Amino acid sequence: MEKIEIGNKEARVVLIQVIDERDTEIVEKEWSIIREKTGQDLLLRAFTVRNWNIDLSPWKAPAVFGNEGFGDGAEKTLSEILKTCNDDTKKYYIGGYSLAGLFALWSACHTKVFGGVAAASPSVWFPGFTEHIRENEMNCGYVYLSLGNKEPKTRNPVMATVGDKIQEVYEILLSQNKKCILEWNEGNHFKDADLRTAKAFSGLLTSPSDLPAFS
């Protein structure tokens, strides 16, 4: 994976995000929005993956659109990312959009490195995922979830479950006493991905430390 870093490399707060090779140009825009919204000194560290469906999937699953199924490369991807998160003086947060948002949620179940997760329009329709986080509690205290209000309105029967699934994820996290936000954005899955991701990270970073779990 290629690593892209934007911001202050000495910053105490490090945001981790996995992106597609075609999305490298939007990372700097995200960083600018996050800086403006939070006023915090931070570093955004983005990792590009070559095969989105394989590198970010926690286990194999059949195709739900097109002909390409899902692999089981998430464990390897997380292992590579964790090699860069070994400074105990820094706070690491992981986030992402779509399947990268799902990967971020899954990652927090399998490491204690991340202080929070920013999952924008995560692919929580992924087969077996809600059951997985019910049985494998996340190792972080803060989770920010968001979804477009038109995303469940798709003809794809699997992806159409995303609205019910994200509500289920939210309720699971509340039952585990996580401090969790669920925000609904305007539009479908393909609207304002950069802005939604920036909002997710910003919402995570500006949540007060004494915030109770809430809806």
Image (spheres, rainbow, N blue to C red):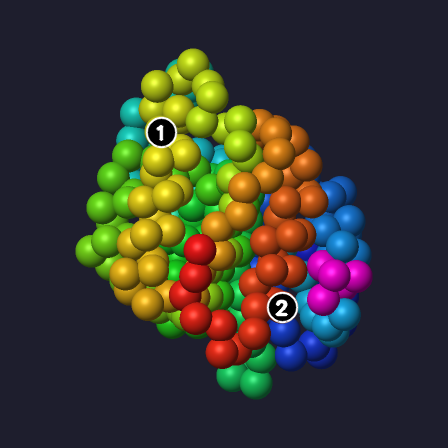
Q: Position of residue 149 (x, y in %)?
A: 53, 32
Start-end of magenta stretch = 34-38
On residue 97, the disc is: none
Q: Position of residue 156 (x, y in %)?
A: 40, 17
Q: Amino acid at mark 2?
A: Thr
Q: Quadrant of residue 73?
A: top left
Q: Quadrant of the C terminus?
A: bottom left
Q: Position of residue 214 (x, y in %)?
A: 43, 61
How many other residues sit within 10 Å of disc 1, few (<14), some (14-19) or many (≥20)? some
On residue 206, the disc is: 2
The secondary element bearing badge 2 is classed as: helix
- Between 10 and 128, the one lying in front of the other is 128
Q: Quadrant of residue 128?
A: top left
Q: Is residue 91 visible?
A: yes
Residue lying at 47% horizontally and 42% vertically, measured from the top left: 122
Residue lying at 34% horizontally and 60% vertically, measured from the top left: 174
Q: Residue 31, relative to residue 69: is it above or below?
A: below
Q: Residue 40, relative to residue 89: is it above or below?
A: above
First in residue order: circle 2 vs circle 1: 1
Residue lying at 34% horizontally and 38% vertically, measured from the top left: 165
How many other residues sit within 10 Å of disc 2, few (<14), some (14-19) or many (≥20)? few
Q: Quadrant of residue 61?
A: top left
Judged left or right of residue 203, residue 163 is: left
Q: Amino acid at mark 1?
A: Thr
Which residue position is annotated with label 1? 161
